[in-house]
Amino acid sequence: MQQTHFYSEDRPTPATRTRLRSGKLFDLDKKPICECTLYDLEDGDIGIVVAETELSVPDRVLIQDNKDLTLAFTQICWRMGPYLFGAYLEPPIPLGMTVDP
């Protein structure tokens, strides 16, 4: 019997030991887009789950990580319904070093 692969070569893969945590998405003008759930990807980037499948999300967003207390400038690289996968454009910075998003 042939094994079915859930993730194809072009889809990002969740990290083996991923941490689910809450977060928020902002546009580049720091206007809120939505609340979300964040998780780690195997390549070190970030997976995002939004509540609305049809939510319009720009290609570049700021992600506030409520557990790590960081803000990251991210490029959305791939999307399937409510699942988005982002590549960090810069390392995340502590929220204390930013102007309120």
Image (cartoon, helix red, strand yellow):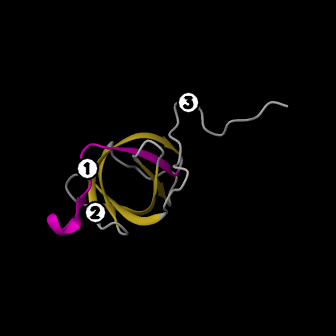
Helix or strand or loop: what does disc 1 sit on?
A: loop
As drawn, the label of residue 70 is: 2
Residue with the most extreme front position: 17
The CA span between labels 1 and 2 is: 10 Å
What residue is shown at x 48% (from left), y 42% (from top)?
Answer: 79
Quarter occupied by residue 36? bottom left
- The three-letter amino acid code for the residue at tag 1 is Pro
Q: Provide the secondary structure element on which disc 3 rests.
A: loop
Q: Is residue 93 magenta?
A: yes
What is the spatial separation of the Cα atoms under label 1 and label 3, in whole angstroms? 25 Å
Q: Position of residue 48 (x, y in %)?
A: 45, 54
Would you call the spot at circle 3 few (<14 residues within 10 Å), some (14-19), or many (20 or more)?
few
* Mark 1 and mark 3 residues within 8 Å of each other at the beta carbon: no
Residue 46 forms part of the magenta stretch:
no
> Which numbered disc covers residue 9?
3
| Region in magenta | 82-101
**Res 10 visible:** yes
